[in-house]
Amino acid sequence: MAMSVARILAMAGGAFALTACSADSDTGGVNSVSAKAASPAMAETPYPSTYKSYPGVPTALVGATVYDGAGGVIPGGTVLFADGKVEAVGLKLATKGYRVIDGTGKFVTPGIIDAHSHLGNYPSPSVDAHEDGNELTSPITPEVWAEHSVWPQDPGFGRALANGGVTAMQILPGSSNLMGGRSVTLKNVPSRTVQGMKFPGAPYGMKMACGENPKRFYGSKGRMPSTRMGNFAVNRQTWLDAKAYDGEKRDLAKETLKGVLDDEILVHNHCYRADEMALVMDMAKEIGYRVTAFHHAVEAYKIGDLLRENDVCAAIWADWFGFKMESYDGIPENAALLQQAGACVIIHSDSANGIQRLNQEAAKAQAAGARMGIDIPDAQVIRWLTLNAAKAMGIDAMTGSLETGKMADLVLWNGDPLSVYSRPEKVWIDGALMFDATNPKHRPVSDFELGQPGEGDVK
Amino acid sequence: MIRSALFAAATALLALACSAAAQDVAIINANVAIGDGGDPIEGATVLVQRGKVVAAGRNISIPADTPTLDGSGTWVTPGLVLAVTDLGLADVGAVSQSNDKAAAKSRFNAALDIAPAINPESLHIKVSRAAGLTRAVVVPSHGGSLFAGQGAIIALGSDGKAVRHPRALQLVALDEGGAQISGGGRAASFAELRNALREARDYAAGRWSGEDNLLTRADAEALSPVASGKQKLFVEVERASDIRAVLALKAEFAQIDMVLVGVSEGWLVADEIAAAGVPVVADALDDLPSSFEQLGATQSNVGRMAKVGVKVAIGRFAGSTDGHPRSLAQFAGNLVALTRVPGATGLSWGQALAAITSVPADIAGHGGHFGVLSPGAHGDLVIWDGDPLEVSSAPMKVFIDGVEQSLENHQTRLRDRYRDLDESDLPKAYDH
């Protein structure tokens, strides 16, 4: 919508197809991913996070409908948080010593988490100089790290916070490459540096892509892969070579792959078609790694049983379809059918616009299920945007649900978050108020927007 | 419960639903929104006869023998109207053979007529119909020329007769994209436009020689009705200063019947747009500085323009991702949400519905004929299972010209096939 019809066309045919990458998934009550967030390898990681939470005051949200992100709901509940952590969630808790905010008629959820974003590496304005998401020189680039492309001044971060209640997100490389590089997980807190946004303790992900994008891009250059079978051949040989890596002479690409093989780096695999996802899961078994999530898995509903059995999440849009051949069978009931099959569902954005409305996308997916007789409680739907995404990103022990001791990342909505009429009123990250709709000074304005038309506007 | 009430009463209608003929029908006890900007009317009736709306509101007498639906718990609106879109021009955007949106290598530009390219069987049309859309203004995309060609007004019915008003408008780009096409700068696009209109007037006046002209004969002929104001000129423009420059063209070419499209920074010059009396088809929710011509983009743009009297419709849904036409009602609902955000300007519920029904119909030159439940209008209406602007709601029935439409499509068949994953007897391929 931000661009002309001509631009949309160009994107659908080319650039978009390259940037739209994989999807991330989450386990809907199956097994959590087993990321070793605090492993020695992580501790030695360069470019470490410098993020520190901002000051907050002990706060009590009282009287709102509280969705805890784990599938629970407390009508008229109280949420207490202080020192950056959730202290308690329950009914009629004592609030002495807390700043009390009346949430009557309002709703509280954990901060929304997007498992698939390109904010920062495809930032606004979307000019050629900002195309930093795909290293388009080789189909195998596990050595590149998304964090080295992220522009922290992307105005999109602030929109995701104010309109979408997004408190954390995974920034992924694009999907032109079979192995696109490492992802980075960010707190949605403005910073002068990307290190200042990095989510402390979050494991890395590795982006992979199957299907049309790699074979089209490299095949058109007369190099491998030019077919889906070529995609697999290149992947398999790369994995086999990585398994032989002894680490004596540092190889950045193989270090990433070794991290995957050691279960320290989580694979986020862009994959649309059901048959291809089934092949990828077998490739993972052949090689000895696990796929954490399939992203953009528009055909996941055809293999909900396989995804459940393999404990792989499907990170999906509510209803995108038909923009490329492998998206032709997308249906709005995808999420509901997956939930019915006991598979893990995540609603993701892959879009600087969609990330502002993940709650609405989830509501659409829920309603499509209800119309075919699959009734999914609101509290479970909220989990698609919170705890399930956190699990796939390996941060579920720290955030994603309102449990005592977890990060106080939360949103106070001015109405039911599954309604089109509701918006975030306040957003806290680690207990610090980072957005307040009632205070124009309490919303982020990126450097890029200073002194420009509409600076500090509601957006 | 809502559905059982409606469908229990619908038995009589089922037989006629399969017929292609316009059916008389009355819907009673529904929340009826006329589409004219007003609030919905509770417990109201809509009466359609011979394919036309006869009446909508309270205290309407229903002729004997009129098939009647009990709409208790349902909402009824005019069929939604999409102000600008590429709907029906591609099956799959990235499959170039199926994509007729632009014709970059054509020798022609303004002469390109999109009507024959529109495919009524497109999955995207069927999905949009199932989302309550019944009419749309379909435009070509810019290929290699400032002028994209001539758009058409379509109905989204299943009768295969989509095109109702071919050559309804010409589309020109006076935004960044147009400048790039015209030679690399905005000065070039304005020079191209002026020259083209001059040559078109020459053509109409019989002064066109075929030599010393930049336009082809076909393009000059196609632009003649634009120059004379007989065909609308839709102008894609975003930046505030560009909007002013476009409005200034009205002084130079007074006969042009102009509509602005896009208009991200319209709120900065809203008074001037209102004073010029030029209607706007705006992107509803653009709020990112996606380009240097959209630095001021905000979701309050539509509301701020409407507030000072600009006639503004929501439109320009293109492609199949963020802005698929099926999301039209959702985007309108978001503008209502803004009325509860401090400092933002949105639309009332009635205004938001009008921005996707009567206003786009009016901008397209068909005010009163569709997009509104007023006497004599086409019998395009949608029965919804809830508030039509709410994301959880969906159409239960869609009528176009009084004919109930099929809401089945490739997606609904996939849904039904994969309702379960049981292949114990036969593969899924036998489940149909």
Image (cartoon, coloured by chain):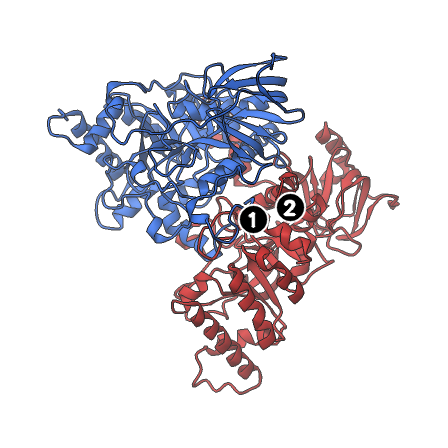
- Tag 2 and tag 1, C-beta contact below 8 Å: no
Q: Can residue B278 be seen in this view?
A: yes
Chain letter for the blue part: A
At x 44% / y 56%, what residue is drawn? B292
Image quarter for residue B226?
bottom right
Q: Position of residue A217 (x, y in %)?
A: 29, 47
Chain letter for the red part: B
Depth check: give the residue in front, A108 or A303.
A108
Please tell me whether mark 2 or mark 1 is closer to you in this view: 2
To which residue does mark 2 refer?
B346
Q: Where is residue B131 in the image (x, y as percent from the top left)?
A: 61, 42
To which residue does mark 1 refer?
B125
Depth check: give the residue in front, A15 or A42.
A42
Image quarter for residue B329?
top right
Along the polypeptide, which appears first: circle 2 or circle 1? 1
Depth check: give the residue in front, A229 or A82.
A82
Q: Mark 1 lies on which chain?
A: B
Please tell me whether residue B187 is drawn above or below residue B401 in the rendered image: below
Q: Is residue A276 visible?
A: no
Please tell me whether residue B166 is drawn above or below residue A204 in the rendered image: below
Secondary element at tag 2: loop
Residue A414 tag number: none
The amino acid beneath tag 2 is Gly
Using the rendered image, report if marks 2 and 1 lie on a common chain: yes
Left or right placement of residue A105 versus residue A237 in this view: right
Image quarter for residue B367?
bottom right
Q: How crowded is mark 1: few (under 14 residues within 10 Å), some or many (20 or more)?
A: many
